[in-house]
Amino acid sequence: MNLASQLVRKIDDQTLSREERVQLRCQLAKELEEAGNFEAARSAMGELWQRIGDRPKLDGLDQHTSAEVLLRVGTLSGWIGSAKQIEGAQEIAKNLISESVTIFQALQAAEKVAESRVDLAICYWREGASDEARVILRDTLSQLVDIDSEQKARALMNSAIVEASTNRLNDALRILTEAAPLFGRSHSHAMKGRFHTNLALVLKNLGEAEQREDYIDRALVENAAASFHLEQAGHIRYRAGVENNLGFLFSTAGKFTEAHNHLDRARRLFVSLKDSVHTAQVDETRARAFLAEGRNQEAEKVARAAVRTLEKGDEHSLLAEALRTYAVAVARLGHQDRARVSLERAIEVAEQAGDIEGGGVAALTMIEELDRSLTPDEMSTVYERADDLLARTQHPGTPVR
C-alpha cells in the first residue's frame, strides 16, 4: 500500500481529533501535489477548501495547522491556476502562502518557512517576475547554508529554473552541477526526476545555443534518467514534460518523426491532466518543429492555438514565446503586417512580465524575419531597441544572431 492510500485510511479514523485529520489531509494533499495530481490534491483538502478564491476554513485550528492549510491551499491555487490558466490565481496563491510564511516565522519553524518561501518564489516566477523570485530564493538559501535538506534542494533547483528561464544558462548549469550531490543523496524519485529534467533542459538549450553536440547527447541521457525516476514516482505531469523536451531535441537533430511521436505522447498526457498551459507549450514546440521542416502553414495553425490558450492566463513569458513563434510562421507565409503586430505584442508582453531578454529576442526576430518589409529608419529603430533590451544578455547564442 503506498503512502497516499495509507493516509486516506487514516483520515477516515473517527478516533482522531479534527486537528489530526486536518494535518493528515494536508499531508495527503502534499503527497498528491508532488506527484503532479493537483485535482486529487484539491479533493484531499475536503471541507477545508475546494475552489480557487475561496478562503480556507481555519476555525478552531492551532497556529501551526492553520499555516499548513494556508500553505497547501496557496500552492494548489498556484498549480491549478497555472494548469487551467485562471487569471489572478497566482496573486491569490501568493497572498495565502505569504500568510503561512508569517505564521511559520512566528513559530520559528525554519524548514517550513523555507518550504513556504520556495513556493512563493515559484508563484512570482510563473508570473514572469524573475527578479522577485531570484531575491526570495537567494534569501532562503542564505538561511540554509549549513543545512542539507529537501528545502535546500528545492531552493537550488528553482534557482536554476529561474536562471534558465531568463537565459542565464551557464549560471543554471553551475547551480545544478554544484547541487548534484545533494540530489544524489535524496531518497525521493520525484525530486531526482525533477532534477534530471531540469538539467536536461539546460543542457538542451546550451547545446542548441553553442552548437555543442556533447551537451545534446548529455541532455538525452539526463532525460532518460528523468523518465526512470518519474515513472517510479508515478509523476505523469513531469513525464509529459520530458516527452516535450525529447520532442524538441529530436526536432533540433532533424529527426522529425521521432520528434512528433514524443510530442504526441506529451500532448496526450497533458490533455488527460486537463493542463491547458502545458498543452499549449507542447503546441508551441510542435510549431517550431513544423517551422524546421518548412511546414509553415501547419506551424501557423498550431502556434495560433497556443497563443489563444496562453492569452487566458498569467504566464506572460510563455505567451511572449508563443507570439514569437506564431510571428515567424505568419512571416514565412508572407503576412508581414500580421507578423509585425504579433512581434510588437510579444515585446510588450515580455517587458510587462519583467522578461527583458524575451522582449529583446522578439525585437531581434523582427529584424531577422521582417528585414525586407522594414524601412531603413524602422530597421535602425528596431535594432536599437533589440540592442538596448539585450545589452546584458547571458544567452550564449544571442550575440551570434
Image (cartoon, grey):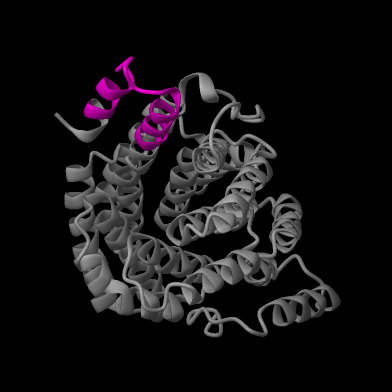
Residue 33: x, y in percent? 39, 39
**Residue 9 included in the magenta stretch of the image:** yes
In the rendered image, the vertical position of residue 229 relative to residue 66, given as above or below:
below
Q: Tell me the quarter of the picture where residue 393 sits.
A: bottom right
Of 262 and 178, nearer the camera is 178
Image height of 388 relative to 129, above or below: below
Q: Which residues are magenta?
A: 6-29
Position of residue 50 measured from the top left corner of the image (x, y, whole percent): 54, 23
Q: Nearer the viewer, residue 352 or 49?
A: 49
Name of the residue lying farthest toward the right: 377
Q: Quadrant of the N terminus?
A: top left
Secondary structure mostly seen in magenta is helix
Query: Is-magenta flag for residue 28?
Result: yes
Q: Is residue 228 left or right of residue 352?
A: left
> Residue drawn at (22%, 43%), measured in percent from left and top?
233
Is residue 326 visible in the rendered image? The answer is no
Viewed as shown, does residue 305 lie left or right of 207?
right
Q: Report x, y in % for residue 8.
A: 29, 23
Image position, residue 249 (x, y; %) = 31, 60
Inspect this view and state whether residue 78 appears. yes
Residue at left offset 71%, top offset 82%: 387
Query: Where does the C terminus fall, quadrant-wise?
Result: bottom right
Left or right: 96, with 19 as reference point: right
Vertical position of residue 328 compared to residue 55: above or below: below
Most foreground residue, 238 or 381: 238
Image point (41%, 69%), residue name? 156
